[in-house]
Amino acid sequence: MDRLRAAILLPMETSVDQWVRAELHLHTYASMDSLVQPQKLLEHCARIGINRVAITDHNSIDGALAAKALAPERVIVGEEIETTQGELLGYFLREWIPGGLEPMEAIERLRGQGAAISVSHPFEQTRGPKWTYEQLLAIAPHVDAIETYNARCFTNQPNEEAAAFAQEHGLQGTVGSDAHSLFEVGRAVLYLPPFEDAAGFLAALPLARPHTRLSPPYVHLFSRYAHIHKKMLQVLRIAEMP
């Protein structure tokens, strides 16, 4: 969608000072590598001036639904879905999408519930499942956006490659802190016109203005600690079973 069509679909009275500050990639306790509680996350976002929050836990919408119940006007129910090739970001979900699906099956399920779709950190090669260039080419016609900036990348090179890919293939760009701790929230946000649903979000994206900075590399230790902590709790629970 070009900027002219987006402007037609958005409220004509909306001025830049009425735009929202949106975080589009956040994790909570529902991800194995995060300890963040939804209530604490929402309080922190309100404190630092983030108006819309997409909670995108790994293969789960439990944290997003818990947060949505607390602040329905602020929270977007999202999910970071681990496919057999790489990860997808779904926004405005109504139903959970399981991990481990083929990319096109996950995309079809997202489309079936009217979700907006972006591709998580597509050129990041140091963590998680990794897309190949050929795989990205195959799904490009079927997604809405590419995550063109992820604050957890160790350098800006993967983000620059993602931005170039999005521009080359006519895709919109999303950005996100990929926060697994409160410290990281707000590192990569979009300022964009107000929106209420997936269609409004996609109409607003061409006008969006990113504000981004990389998180320090040590934030990955927060994820590692959370993962070990939860594993230890699991071991203790099993040990306490009769």
Image (spheres, helix red, strand yellow):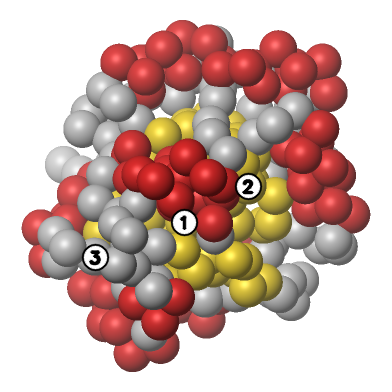
**Can you tell which of label 2 and label 3 is closer to the viewer?**
2
Q: Quadrant of the C terminus?
A: top left
On screen, residue 8 above or below 170: below
Please name the residue that numbered disc 1 is placed on: 24
Assign a secondary structure to mark 2: strand
Label 1, residues with CA under 10 Å away: few <14, some 14-19, many ≥20: many
Residue at the (67%, 64%) spot, across then down:
151
On screen, residue 228 above or below 139: below
Residue 185 in the image: x percent, y percent? Answer: 49, 74
Q: Amino acid at mark 2?
A: Gly
Please name the residue that numbered disc 3 is placed on: 74
Residue 100 in the image: x percent, y percent? Answer: 50, 19
Please name the residue that numbered disc 2 is placed on: 173
The residue nearer to you, when weighing 199 against 35, is 199
Quick one: label 3 or label 1, which is nearer the N terminus?
1
Residue at the (73%, 22%) spot, across then down:
136
